[in-house]
Image (spheres, rainbow, N blue to C red):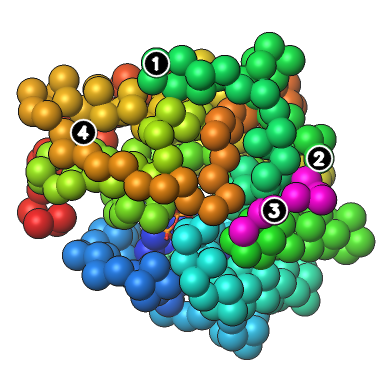
Amino acid sequence: MKIVVTGGAGFIGNHIAEFYSKQGNDVFVFDNLSRAILLKKNIKNIDYNWNYLKKFKNIQLIKGDIKNFKEIEKVSKNADAIIHAAAQTAVTSSVVDPLSDFETNALGTFNVLEAARRNDVKSIVYCSTNKVYGGNVNNINVYEKELRYIFEKKYQKGISENFPMDLCEHSPYGCSKLTGDLYTQEYGKLYGIKTGVFRMSCIYGTRQFGVEDQGWVMWFTIAALLDKPITIYGDGKQVRDILYITDLVELFDKFINSNLKNVVLNVGGGPRNTLSLLELIELLGKKTGKKINIKFSNWRASDQKVYISDISKAIKMLGWKPKISTPEGIKKIYDWVSSNLILFK
Ligand SMILES: NC(=O)c1ccc[n+]([C@@H]2O[C@H](COP(=O)([O-])OP(=O)(O)OC[C@H]3O[C@@H](n4cnc5c(N)ncnc54)[C@H](O)[C@@H]3O)[C@@H](O)[C@H]2O)c1
């Protein structure tokens, strides 16, 4: 198969590209290497993932921009599947620069879909986000415990795909990603393309260049190991379900190989794999044997106090479930950062 992976120099796309290359496919990675620019951060060794893929003979690396229709149209010719992981990824950056966010996430995704339609690409996977549900998530009652908030009983399985998503705040990022989410669904229904829309909670894993604004599990781990200060926005009792990267890749692949035509699925570690910011700090303190250097600041706009994905639909439709538990996953990234500290210094 010819598989195009947009955002393949980033964290998720990089793992997807490696996976499909190892399965013997022809993989075309399409990325403009803009993570650091979009996040307005100096991220050391941000080209590490790009260079990492150079050893795979059946991967072609193409520097290109999804905002440029002609470029994405060209690479999509004769593709069997596109996995669309390129994006502006931070809520905070979207608030500061909503135009870049819109152009990358809304227009860029539209270009990917239109390129797929014109080239008769059979399948598209779209990396959506829990942020499409926006501030409505905060209408759920939560109870405060020592280190975390918990959802009221009715939501113990988490948030399902039919949770309301309008009449609330989203952040520009939530809006631009929702635009891509809806367009992907539309291209599936109207033009008959097989489409998987995956509304992801927090994904974490090796080769993730997490920073304060995005990729918090990895950012806390890097900061703890390098004695960098960590700012916690809010009280740190925010909870997310977290999913290890290999479980996500397996889910995408199950969808591509399934008979399902169009799906919208909430994806994360589910209720069994949740973590609060304070709990991760405590865990990292135990692992490093040091007091982690934290300070507190005001809550961020559009932050969700608790977000846990109800993954029962993904489990039922695709016979999938997360294999890597939270402690196992944290150990994996902790060990990876420990042996690659030089990348982050
Ligand atoms: N990591 C998570 O926890 C998470 C959660 C929910 C949704 N997502 C979504 O998953 C996708 C991948 O996220 P990630 O964590 O791998 O982010 P990432 O920043 O590591 O990767 C994104 C990649 O997209 C590339 N890119 C950005 N703009 C581009 C453009 N105009 N043209 C071509 N390439 C461009 C960047 O250079 C980067 O390599 C994104 O769509 C993100 O919104 C991620």
Numbered tag placed on residue 164 in the rendering: 2
Marks 1, 4: nearer the viewer: 1
**As drawn, 139 above or below 9:** above
Pointer 1 and pointer 4: residues touching (CB < 8 Å)?
no
Q: Is residue 239 above or below residue 14?
A: above
Q: For mark 2, give the secondary structure.
A: loop
Q: Is residue 14 visible?
A: no
Q: Is residue 168 magenta?
A: yes
Cα distance between the residues tagged 4 and 3 = 35 Å
Image location (x, y in percent) of residue 338: 12, 39
Q: Residue under circle 4?
A: 334
Relative horizontal placement of residue 190, taking residue 24 as reference (left or right): right
Q: Residue at x 39, y 60 (%)?
A: 10
Identity, as a three-letter code, of the amino acid under mark 2? Pro
Name the residue beneath numbered marker 1: 146
For label 1, the SS is loop
Residue receiving disc 3: 169
Identify the mark nearer the N-term, 1 or 3. 1
Find the magenta span and give its range. Answer: 165-171
Quadrant position of residue 99: bottom right
